[in-house]
Amino acid sequence: MKVEKIIFMLACSLLTLAGCNKYLDVKPDQKMLVPKTLADCDALLDNRSTMNSSFSPIPDIASDHYYLKAANFNAIANSEDRNAHVWNQMAELATNHWQAPYKVVLIANQVLSLLKDIDRSVNPTDYERIKGEALFFRAYAWMQLLNVFTVGYDAAKAKNILGVVLRLNPDIDYIESRSSLEDSYQQIKKDLEEAVPLLPEKIVIKTRPTKAAALATLARLGLMMGDYGIAEKRAREALDLYAVLIDYTTLSKTASAPFARFNDEVIFHAVTFTNASINPTIAKIDSNLIKSYKNDDLRRTLYFKSNNNGTYAFKGRYDGAVNASTFCGVATDELYLTLSEALVRNNKVVDAIGYLNKLLRSRYVKNTYLDFSSDDRELVLKEVLAERNKSLIMRNLRWMDMKRLNQDPAFQKTFRRIIDNVVYSIEPNDLRYAFLIPKKVIEFNPLIQQNQR
């Protein structure tokens, strides 16, 4: 396939990939390999196995939503997976946690570079859509990297904290250092804001981004930055374009995968690569989380499967799969929760409760949900955050929430795991909220500074 030939050429330029030179000894047919047209750009961006499936599952592996029994933990073959699960301060991640998202960045940059040599006037609609898609994918990949390899955002410190490597073009003849955390967030914000007017409002292929996807991602970025003005504004705009909620009463409680791939709530489809730690055959959902759902709450039966021994496994992936990866795209339930949180933090409590209740009515047995009501801002915020935690299981978002909320004294918490009677913990604002960059990446590019310990 043409796309595979194009990807081959780009893959040889990726950081830390070894052994590619031997293939380059054979001169390829450049006419077949070098992308030049809008159709080539589409082919690059439509390669779902790369652009939509290259994200690290670390934000779920390190989350508090589940635990592993000692026998299962000890049976995990890779030490890096075990170390990530218990927040080992010297946890060495496999290279693909860094490399795979940067492949998305590389391809997005290649497309943006190609567009400079293509006449926009020939097909302005596709030209602008493709440019918007490339900007979105680049920003989305950087956000996933920020979630794994950087500490939480603090506006007062972000200029002096390391962020990600901001590669803005596909050239491979030079190496770059990490940008500041502030510059990293601002570049992502810039890319997404530039993408919004270029992207279409509607598209039938949910692996391609839309205006709503870019706006929703900006809203998520607002939460990550603690900028609730951005979060509110962009979440409202996204919901104005797409606000569909699934009526959970229409779903099968007994199905092994209750949610269809590309279901009605999915705005943008993306998944992580697989990892043994979060395989539903061994990952047990935290019992306190299970107990937090009321009997008429359909999330309890649609998200979880009883193992018939007092433990539960997660089955509620939003892409209809049952393997050891997680959905990490954008969906409307997240948007409702983001807007609700932003509103209450912006002292618009009544509006916040309205969006929360609208979401939850669709999650309960018909006519059993009693609308939440309170004029106590702090109580409402706690309720919104509790429902966020109960709704967004295995969405690659919990780690983001753990570190951003731990910057707020009102929500600071020490998380613990117990395996073989050994207690593992991670404190608020711990440096371990930023995982170490794989050693092979730094060996390849010594300008990249390692995270502190």
Image (cartoon, rainbow, N blue to C red):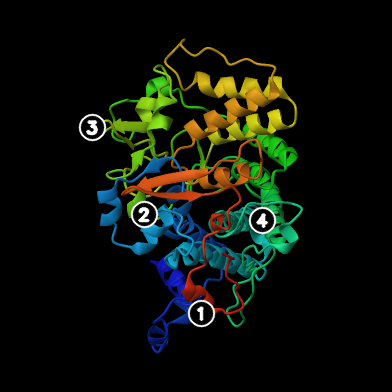
For mark 4, give the secondary structure. helix
Residue 274's label in the rendered image is 2
Taking 135 as reference, is 417 left or right?
Answer: left
Disc 4: which residue: 188
Label 3 is placed on what type of residue? Asn
Depth check: give the residue in front, 256 or 130: 256
Mark 3 highlights which residue? 309
The nearer-to-camera label among 4 and 3 is 3
Q: Classify mark 1: helix, strand or loop.
A: helix
Kind of residue at badge 1: Glu
Q: Secondary structure at mark 2?
A: loop
User: Could one spot residue 61 in this view of the protein?
Assistant: yes
CA gap, disc 1 and disc 4: 26 Å
- Marking on residue 243: none
The answer to which of marks 4 and 2 sits earlier in the sequence is 4
Report, in whole angstroms, how far the alpha carbon at label 4 lies from the one at label 3: 45 Å
Q: Quadrant of the C terminus?
A: bottom right
Of the residues under marks 1 and 4, which one precedes in the sequence?
4
Residue 250 in percent (x, y) is at: 38, 22
Q: Residue furthest bottom?
A: 25
Instruction: State the image quarter where residue 291 is shown.
Output: top left
Q: Residue at x 63, y 75 (%)?
A: 176
Q: Where in the figure is residue 393, as x and y percent of width and height?
A: 45, 38
The residue type indicated by label 2 comes to Thr
Please identify, in this view, whether the residue under mark 2 or under mark 3 is nearer the observer. Answer: 3
